[in-house]
Amino acid sequence: MTTLETRSLHQCFGGVQGFYQHPSEIIGLPMRFSVYQPPQAQYQRVPVVFFLAGLTCTEETFMIKAGAQRYAAEYGLMLVTMDTSPRQTGIPGETDDWDFGAGAGFYLDATQSPWSQYFRMESYITQELRQIIIDQFPADPNRIGIFGHSMGGHGALTLALRYPELFRSVSAFAPICAPMQCPWGQKAFRHYLGEDQSSWRQYDATALIADGRSISDLLIDQGLNDQFLTQQLYPEALEKSCREADQKLTLRFHSGYDHSYYFISTFIGEHLKYHREQLG
Ligand SMILES: N[C@@H](CCC(=O)N[C@@H](CS)C(=O)NCC(=O)O)C(=O)O
């Protein structure tokens, strides 16, 4: 069992907010993550929701900015967040861009050198981190959901579609819905996955649904004043794919809201309520 280094613990809404680091076998480097344990976790295993953050974020961003712990305590949900990529890999140029490399792992397993040696966030989350949460925290392994924001919304959608046996509920804030079609996704996929676009489809929620993958339900919130909406996010492409495939989708547009955590914190309570209901 991997040894966790506890970086800090904080009492929060009757539960415990913890920040951890461990030597990751799958990444081959130290990885950081954080867990909020609600008060109910003191005496029983509780349902869990993984949150995947967006570009430039770390394992701290959501826990500091989303205001989620109040609702997690109310609904008895454990929250798990992780860093958005491996760090300090030594790969030349890994910190040159804010939308690629460090802070931009895109929740996939890279196949192209040099990234493929370390950038394996898909396996890290679905195998190693999931197992740590089940083994070392009072988590109910049969009630795990996933959600995320922007790049992390893309991650939540694609991991839920690819691993329906692992994640029983899914939602997203302003997700990158069709990464094969937008500049952020094309840049990342070209470097991580190579030029052959047939290998990109498995990491594109709109394509996965068109190719027959499905999930029981899906909730997405999107601000209409989001500075990335028209260039990068393409919710209408996902909506079309869902409609054609008969995939259930609740896509809500909100006038005035931008891409920030002010938007996320406004709707976080509704997302956690949704996950609590879906997870039973
Ligand atoms: N660094 C970019 C913005 C990156 C950005 O907006 N990241 C989003 C996710 S895509 C985020 O959550 N940032 C962290 C924050 O708002 O605290 C810029 O300067 O335009």
Image: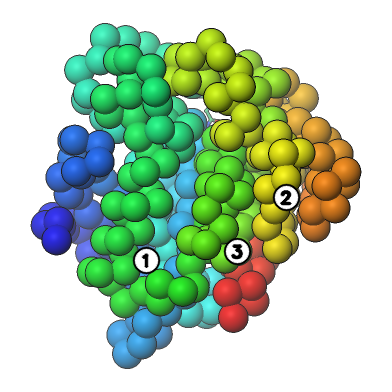
Residue under label 3, please give it.
169
Q: Residue at x 80, y 57 (%)?
A: 248
Horizontally, is 223 left or right of 195 in the view? right
Residue 154: percent from the left, percent from the top?
A: 59, 39
Q: Which is nearer the N-term, disc 2 or disc 3?
A: 3
Specify whether tag 2 is near ligand 1 (CB below 8 Å).
Answer: no
Horizontally, is 117 left or right of 251 in the view? left
Q: Which is nearer the N-term, disc 2 or disc 1?
A: 1
Residue under label 1, please give it.
36
Q: CA distance from mark 2 to mark 3?
A: 15 Å
Residue under label 2, please give it.
221
Residue 279: percent from the left, percent from the top?
A: 58, 74
Is residue 214 among what the camera can see? yes
Specify whether tag 1 is near ligand 1 (CB below 8 Å).
Answer: no
Which numbered mark, 2 or 3, is in the foreground of this view? 3
Residue 76: percent from the left, percent from the top?
A: 48, 79
Q: CA distance from mark 2 to mark 1?
A: 23 Å
Q: Amino acid at mark 3?
A: Ser
